[in-house]
Amino acid sequence: MNHLFMIMMLYMTALLVGCDKDSGWETMQLLDEQVAEIRISDFETWDEMNGDTLLSFKEAKDVRAFEEAIRTARKQPDDAKRTDPDYDVMVVYAQPSPIHAIKLWLGEEGQESVFSYGFKDWGEDVYVVSAKHTDRMRELILPEGH
């Protein structure tokens, strides 16, 4: 009887764990490497990243703010892009690694923002960033009073 009970419990656990993950919960991926810098530049074209850096964030708390926003951005089932992005975001790693290229549509204060991977061959999906993360990115990117 104990053996049957144990099998039933394992089956129920597996069933519950399998149902726990919502299909819309996929998040953006970064490398499992330390992020050393976040570079922000104006969006110019879909074909390449703008190399004219407007802002460079190297302080750990600022880097963490962007990294957390990127890693928690939730994939949306609708992959249509509304307009051209506002910014190119380049994630630079401490170890010699490729730079992660991301496009950013920066939301208004208290609203969500949108990320997508930097090049169309990486996929057309969009990822929504919470209003909390939008507000923090706005503090870092925009000058006072904007």
Image (cartoon, grey):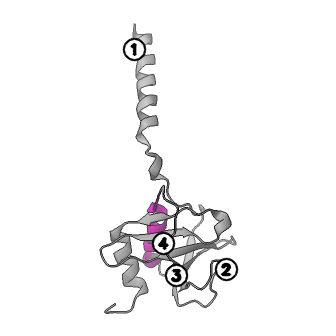
Q: Is residue 3 magenta?
A: no
Q: What is the x, y in percent for residue 131?
A: 34, 70
Q: Could you tell me which secondary element the residue under label 3 belongs to?
A: strand
Q: CA distance from mark 4 to mark 3?
A: 14 Å
Q: Which residues are magenta?
A: 61-76
Q: What is the x, y in percent for residue 18?
A: 46, 35
Q: Earlier in the sequence, mark 1 or mark 4?
A: 1
According to the image, label 4 marks what residue?
82
Q: What is the x, y in percent for residue 134?
A: 38, 74
* Figure check: 6 above or below 105: above
**Looking at the image, which residue sits at the far top?**
1
Q: Earlier in the sequence, mark 4 or mark 2?
A: 2
Res. 5 mark: 1
In the rendered image, which quarter is residue 74 located in? bottom left
Q: Nearer the viewer, mark 1 or mark 4?
A: 4
Res. 87 mark: 3
Q: Counting other residues with Cα less than 10 Å from the Cα at mark 3, is it few (<14), some (14-19), or many (20 or more)?
A: many
Q: Counting other residues with Cα less than 10 Å from the Cα at mark 2, is it few (<14), some (14-19), or many (20 or more)?
A: few
Q: Could you tell me which secondary element the residue under label 2 belongs to?
A: loop
Q: Earlier in the sequence, mark 2 or mark 3?
A: 2
Q: CA distance from mark 1 to mark 4?
A: 53 Å
| Point 47% across, 46% down: residue | 23
According to the image, label 2 marks what residue?
48
| Point 43% across, 45% down: residue | 22
Q: Amino acid at mark 2?
A: Glu
Q: Counting other residues with Cα less than 10 Å from the Cα at mark 4, is it few (<14), some (14-19), or many (20 or more)?
A: few
Q: Is residue 65 magenta?
A: yes
Res. 14 mark: none
Proximity of marks 2 and 3: CB atoms separated by less than 8 Å: no
